[in-house]
Image (tube, rainbow, N blue to C red):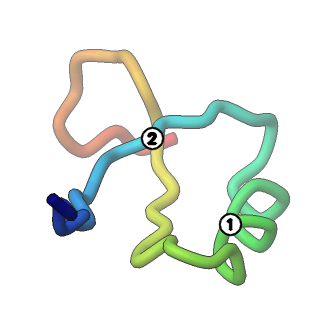
Amino acid sequence: MERELKSVPGVATFAGGCFWCMAPPFLNHPGVAEVISGYTGGHLENPSY
């Protein structure tokens, strides 16, 4: 009996020194639907830094 494999979207989080250096390697990677840059941690909803 063969089983049908289904693609399940997932989330991966990577940390780096600069937004512009981290996004390009993932933008052209097969299977990546979206790349979002941002800050992690902190407590402010809209930080000014």
Decide if residue 47 is on the left or right side of residue 2: right
Decide if residue 19 is on the left or right side of residue 8: right
Query: Residue at left 77%, top 73%?
Result: 24
The residue nearer to you, when weighing 34 against 32, is 32
Label located before the other in sequence (1 or 2): 2
Q: Residues within 10 Å of mark 1 (few under 14, many from 20)?
A: few
Secondary structure, mark 2, is loop
Query: Residue at left 46%, top 48%?
Result: 38
The residue nearer to you, when weighing 38 against 4, is 4
**Residue carrying label 2:** 12
The residue nearer to you, when weighing 40 against 9, is 9
- Amino acid on which the number 1 mark rests in the picture: Phe
Secondary structure, mark 1, is helix
Query: Residue at left 18%, top 68%?
Result: 4
- Amino acid on which the number 2 mark rests in the picture: Ala
Residue 25, how many percent across, how many down?
Answer: 80, 67
Residue 49, how many percent across, how many down?
Answer: 52, 41
**Residue carrying label 1:** 26
Residue 34, how many percent across, how many down?
Answer: 42, 74
* Label 1, label 2: how far apart the Cα atoms are: 11 Å
- Asked if 13 appears above or below 9 in the picture, the reply is above
